[in-house]
Each structure stands twice: as C-alpha cells, then as structure tokens.
Image: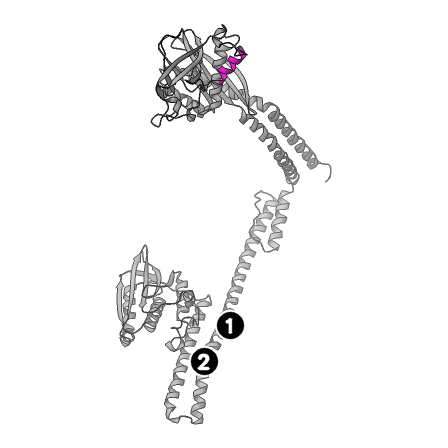
Amino acid sequence: MRTGIVFKLFLLTSALCLFILAVIFVGQTVFFKQFYVNKKVDNIQASLQSFETAYANSGGDTHAIDKLEEEFYRKHNTWITTVDKLGNLKGTDDFYIEVKLDPDQDHSIAGETITVPLYSLVGAEEISKKNPFLREGERVILNGITVDSAAVTYRVGLGNGNIAWENQQMAKKEHEIIPSFDNPAEEHEEFPSYFLYGHITKVQLPDGNRASRFVYSNHLFIDRVKEFQANLLLGKEKKQPVGLQMIDYEENDVKYKIMIDPIIVGGEPAYVIAMTSLQPVDEAVQMIQAYYVYLILFVMILILLLSFYYSKRIARPLLLINRTTKKIAALDFSEKISIASKDEIGDLSQTINELSDTLHSHIKQLRQDIEKEKQLENTRKEFIAGVSHELKTPLSVIKSCISIVRDGVASHKREHYLEAMENEVNRMDMLIVDMLELAKFESGTYKLKLDAFFIDTVIRQICQQLSLELDKKQLQLHTDLAPVEVIANQHRIEQVITNFLTNAIRYSPEKESISITAMEEEGSVKVCVENKGVHIEKQHVEKIWDRFYRGEPSRQRSKGGTGLGLAICKKILDLHGAAYGVANTAEGVLFYFYLPKKV
C-alpha cells in the first residue's frame, strides 16, 4: 500500500479509537467506583427527606411505617428504620413480653411492669409460642440500665439463673466498662444497671394473622441498630448525634454505608437509621475490568474494519461490480448492484443488472425445459418397466393356453382356454389404458380445466351406474350428501369417486354395507367412501397409493383391476391440490378427499 490518503486515514482512525478506549478505561476503572458510591449515597440522602416527611405524617401507625420501610428497600435496596431517643426500635407492639415486677425491690423504674422488646434479644424466626421460656407466669430476671427513669433491658435470665436471651452489643459495652465481674455491676456508677425479678404476664409474637415487621428479617441491620443503641447509651462520650452521620462498615468482605439522621417526632428526638450495601459497586467494577478484555479485542477489530472501510470507499463501486459479475459468471443471479449514482459507473451497474435479469430468465426457462424432459424420460422408463413387468403374467397365460389348444390336449376344454386368453387380452388392454393415463398425469404437461358442479348429483349418478355391481353382492349403500357446488374437474373427480366405490364393492364381503358422505367443513366439502368388513394392515396403509401395489392379501390380481387405479386417483387429487387419505375404521376402511366450495 502506497503512503497516501488511505494510509493516513488508517493511522488517524487507529490512534483516535485507541485514545478513546484509553480514556474510557481510565475513567471507568479509576473514577467509576467512587462516582457510583457518591451517586448512590446522594440518592439515598435525598430520599431520606421524603421518608422522614412520610414518617411524620404516618401518625405512628405501625403498618404504615412498616410499608414505608419496605417500599424504601424495594426502591433503593437500602434497609431503613426509626428508633427513639433511647435507641429502641419504634413500632414493636407485635414482638415483646410484659413482665410484672416483684414488690419490695429497690429500683428507680417507674411503674410495676416492664415491657421488654424481644427484637433486641432474639430473632423473630428463632422463637415461637411453644418456646418454654415464653409461658405466662414464668419467673425471669431482667438485667438492664436505667436512663431517665426508663428501663432498657438487654439481658433476660430464667428463675434458675441461666441466661435465656442477651443483647450482645449492649453486653459488649458492659464488658468494656466492667472488665471483671468480681463485684456486681450496680456498684459501678458509670454503669447504672439494674437486676429485677418478676414473672411474665403477657407474650406478644408475630402470627399468621399479622405479618412480622420487614426489618426483623435482616439480622445484620438489626445488629447495627442495637450497636447504635449501645453506643448511644453506653458510649464514652454519650453524646447524641447532631446532623447526618455516615459510617463505613464491613462484614464478610462486604462494605456497607450506614446513615444516621436525627429527627424530631412529636416533640421528642428520634433517629432514622439506614444501611445500604456497596457490594454491587465492587461487582460492577470487577465486571467492567473483565469486560474491557473483550472490549479491547472488539475495538481492535473495529479499528481494522473502519480503516479497511475508508481505504476501500473510493474503490467500493468497482469492487461491488467485480463481485457481482463473478457471481453472474458462476450462474448466481441472486445479487444486484445497488449503485444509483448518476455517472458512468451507475450506467454500467444498471446495464449489468439488466444483463443479469435477462440471463437469469433464459437460464431458468432452460432449466425448466431440461427438468420437464428429464421427467418425461423418467415417465417413459417407468412406463416401459411397469408394462413389461405387468404384461409378463398375462402373456405367460396366453402362451400356455395357445400351446394346450395347438397340441390338442383337453380338447373338450377348448372354449375354456379361449375364454381365458380373451380375459387376459382384455386385462392387458385395461392395463395399457391405465398406464397411458398415469403417464400423462406424471409427465407434468397435463393441465386441469376446473368448473363448478354439484357434488351430490355426481355421486348419485355414479351410484346408479354401479347399482348392478352392488346388487350382485347384495350390498347396502347408505348416502348422506349435502347439495354443495364445488370447484374441480368434474370428469376426473367422477373417475376418483368411481374408483373408490368400485374398490369398496370389490373388497366388501357379501351382504355388508357401504356408506358415501359429502359434508361441508369450513369452506370445503369432505367426500368419504367407507366399506365394511375388511381392514388394511397398518404397515400397508401408505403403500396402497403406489402403482401395482400387492401388499394387502385381499388386493390380489384375481380380484380384478390393474393395480393402477389408486395411483391414478392420487395424481388427480394432487393436480387439484386436494387433501386426501385412507384410514382403517372400527368396521372397515375409509377413503376420503376434500374439494373447495364455490364461493
């Protein structure tokens, strides 16, 4: 390739595509992750305001709040809930126990009973009403802390001193404040804990009539809520958060963002806590890095294709003409030159297209003529082979009879042998006529002339013509014919019906019945001929349309016929484009075909 405009365009295209690829790769692998995180956090922060407004308007309705939290999760894939100033989850009236305290205990807790939310002690799916620790009247020991005369229970023990449930986050803070348990916790001023005794008076658990709160289903989120409560009540600074706080958290190599936003509800401080997973960000970055391996290969191929396109653009018309003329030389006329320019190349393209159409037309006609000639030749060969085979038997019979008559053997049966020879001559005559007719249909040159006629009239005429044959075997004929006008070649359809009915008479036992019907079916007429008393073996059903078929024992030469009747019927019906067939019924054999009704 010479150093010219094509080569320059190739270098420019390659450099530009590689530069764009490098910029996209650096941008997405270096800045995409931080952009994704910031965008997601910004969206959640913006949605927090809407959630807080909707929460304030809910009026404390637990069902409405739970629906808000679930909808927020579906929309942002972020868990969210609200806690009061003590860090207790709001709306826990479906999952708690009520404990009546024993009298004469030294404590500063207001009231004679304590309500203990169970979500902070145990998972909702881990307990049931059959739990022996949740029976009303059960003795329990409550361990917690007192904040402004309010009790926050973080450990529940049984009457025997064993611990039933424990808030692990609060217990962890307890261990940080009190490293040793040599002395009771209540002796430490910085840890205002209490130990109270009482018995359970009420147990409230989620049941089938009331769905459990949505946030209960995520243990990790509930643990973060409990951790916030522990830090709020037992942290070193014990300061309430001011303004929106963002906390990074990692669990099992998955990073999370926790957002804590203080709000005022009903004049009391509260906190909105939201937690979102950043795992999709890491997965997206990993997928982008893996994706770029394929993208680089794709872009390299694209660069080569674009360069090739620009280098060939000027020569494209000539290349297209060259390709099309090669196909024409190989007798492939499927492609046309699509150059519509108003110049010499456009004129040349139009001339080549016209030449292609002319050659295609003449070659197609030539192929059709050759195909017809081949079909005629095959028909001649099959005709000669069939006649030779079928004439062999009657000629042998005639030859034997002539020898017997000539030698004077059994002279008293001379008339019998002469009659046998006459029958064989008549059979050969019928065979030749049928073979000629079949060859005419198979030649591909026979054209049907269609006309309109009433099918019921034609069938009745054929039944009348064959009435003597029916009477000879004492057969009963049943007809059910709809007076419908059809479009077909009347003479050939008469030939088909006559053949079907003749076969039915020939192969029906004496005193049996034959039925002929012509019924309308959605724009067509179905003609059926059914004879009783015999069946065609299943393996021979499809073969009966073959010429000289002898597979069925009942269809032997002694029954009469040339073995070509059904083959001729098949060709006639094929020329009509009609559906047809044969089937064994419960009592005999059914032949049928369809003809279109006159509109």
Query: Mark 2 sits on what residue?
Result: 393
Per the model, the C-alpha gap separating discs 1 and 2 is 20 Å
Stretch of the chain drawn in magenta: 168-176
- Residue 85's x, y, as percent? 43, 11
Whether 173 is among the magenta residues is yes
- Depth check: 47 or 159 in front? 159
Whether 471 is among the magenta residues is no
Q: Which numbered disc, 1 or 2, marks the residue that appears first in the sequence?
A: 1
Question: Eyeballing the image, is 61 above or below 188?
Answer: below
Q: Is residue 25 visible?
A: yes
Q: Residues within 10 Å of mark 2 (few under 14, many from 20)?
A: few
- Residue 263's x, y, as percent? 44, 11
Q: Is residue 567 left or right of residue 454?
A: right
- Residue 422's x, y, as percent? 39, 84
Which element is circle 1 on? helix
Query: Mark 1 sits on what residue?
Result: 381
Q: Main SS of the magenta segment?
A: helix
Image quadrant for the N terminus?
top right
Single out the residue that lies furthest toward the right: 2
Question: Eyeballing the image, is 353 above or below 579?
Answer: above
Q: Give me the disc on residue 597.
A: none
Q: Residues within 10 Å of mark 1 (few under 14, many from 20)?
A: few
State which quadrant residue 149 falls in: top left
